[in-house]
Image: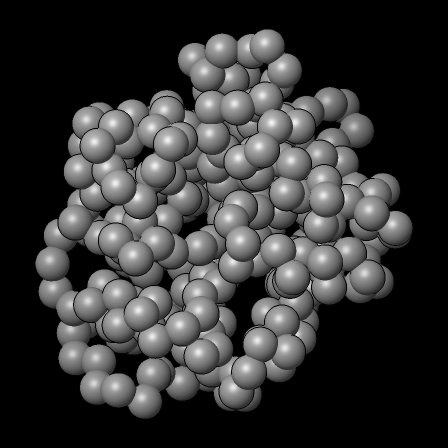
Amino acid sequence: MSPSTPDIPLPGGRAGRIEWHASADQASWIAASTQAIVKAMREAASAKRFVHLLLSGGSTPAPIYCALSECTLDWPRVTIGLVDDRDVDPDADGSNARLVHETLLRGAAAAARFEPLRGTGRSLHDAVRAANERFVVGTSATHERANEVGLAVLGMGDDGHTASLFPGATNLPAVLMSRKPYALIDATGCPVAGAFAHRITLTPTGLGYARNRILLIRGSVKQRVFEAALQSGPASEMPIRYAIDLPGAPLQVHWCP
């Protein structure tokens, strides 16, 4: 489907900063979203020897990652990183690294280079420091600088958060103002964070390095939340607004009922 805004009225200056892609059902949404990711990756690869892809966790993107694993890409040239992760070991329940391993890194896609944010036995503070060092310095002499991100795949919560930028998080103002790509966030007391209050997350600065950004959402509730995010208001109240407001390419939003 060609880009458009949602069918419901969406006043506010942010409407011009998105491209809305609506699918009729889950199957067509998976196909359209997967195709969009492949297209963005191929375009980035035409300009760079290696392509960096940042992925979000959660149940929403899982079927798309499964479909993406079957797509033809030059996977050895792809470095996969994470938008955020919880304070758990990479193979534990609730780990976004585990989700990526189980859904994407199989078959031909297993040839991609994967850089989890959390290491087994590593503290969250050490994980943040290592992620920032890797992002700035790059990964090795054979890989280009990690901060040249071709695509970031995002999700959005019912509270308007994206990555692990939760409204009301204890240190959210400092994280939003950080000049580092990754930060530790304390979401204690934020209901949407659940049992995983302490996390490592991409900051708005880090998200700004992405050449393209895709948001994957489903259902009428998420549509209404996104409609609210397009209205006037501070980004700190609905951090998905940072993804909308960033300069560069418009945010690509893929939605289905």
Q: Residue furthest left?
A: 233
Asked where in the image residue 193 lies, by quadrant, the reply is top left
Viewport quadrant of the C terminus: bottom left
122 or 215: which is nearer to us? Answer: 122
Looking at the picture, how far across and down is residue 182, in whole percent? 42, 29
Query: Could you say where residue 80 lies in the image, as x and y percent from the top left?
Result: 67, 41
Q: Residue at x 18, y 38 (%)?
A: 168
Residue at the farthest right position? 107
239, above or below 212, in the image: above
- For the point 59% across and 22% down, which residue is it? 89
Residue at 12 percent across and 65 percent down: it is 232
Q: Which quarter of the picture shows residue 66?
A: bottom right
- Measured as percent of width and height from the top left, residue 10 is found at 22, 80
Q: How is the image coloured?
A: one colour
Image quadrant in which the N terminus is located: bottom right
Q: Position of residue 142 (x, y in %)?
A: 79, 29
Residue 217, relative to residue 140: is it above or below? Answer: below
Report whether residue 182 is seen: no
**Total numbered badges shown on the rendered structure:** 0
Q: Is residue 35 visible?
A: yes
Q: Viewed as shown, does residue 250 lie left or right of 190?
A: right
Residue at the (19%, 27%) spot, across then down = 170
